[in-house]
Image: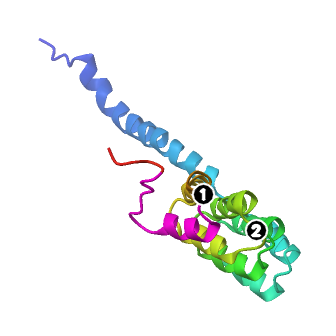
Amino acid sequence: MRNFQPICDRIRWPLLPMSMVSTLALLALPAAAANDAFSDDNFFACTADLLEAEIDVSAAAAACSSSRYPEALGACVLDVADFTGIAAADALSVCQRSRQPTQVADCTIDIHDSLLLEPRPLALEYCGRSLLPERYATCVIDLSDAAELDADETLTRCIRSGYRPWEVAPRL
């Protein structure tokens, strides 16, 4: 009598390495796509933006070469300097420390456009300090509008941890 192996025993082992490799390749695709979405390695644009904002050549080169997102850094400094009148050196200092330089610029510009008539470096500093700059800007603008507080007071109140504007949103 002949010893017959089931066909599934003969096919299973050669396909196992191939299926493992294809599974790993499929798992790596989303990670590569996410990496590409955040790769912002345009050092030329960063340096050009900083030079346009009248930052010293050596300071611009040092800042762009050490930045994780150089294009965002250059855009942050240029936008803050152009739209708010805050000194480019101050903007560079804050944008360079931030993990989200474009959000810091948006925060500063939104606060400036809504509340401020003159350049206020405190708005830039607090936007850079905030973990959620866009939410911070919303807090400052809405609190100032609803409670009719001045800009300096709302800047300080919204940056304080744990502050809740009870006059605007009462306790339940």
Look at the image and give the residue range highlighted in magenta: 148-167
Name the disc covering residue 148, or none: 1
- The image quadrant of residue 155 is bottom right
**Nearer the observer, 3 or 67:** 67
Give the vertical position of 141 relative to 42 (above or below).
Answer: above
Indicate the amino acid at tag 1: Glu
Which residue extends farthest left?
Answer: 1
Q: Is residue 61 visible?
A: yes
Q: Residue at x 35, y 33 (%)?
A: 14
Q: Is residue 88 left or right of residue 149?
A: right
Task: Judge whether residue 96 is colored magenta.
Answer: no
Seen in the picture, residue 148 relative to 7 is either above or below; the reply is below
Does 145 sit above or below residue 122?
A: above
| Left or right position of 93 against 27 | right
Q: Which mark is residue 80?
A: 2
Q: Residue at x 48, y 50 (%)?
A: 168
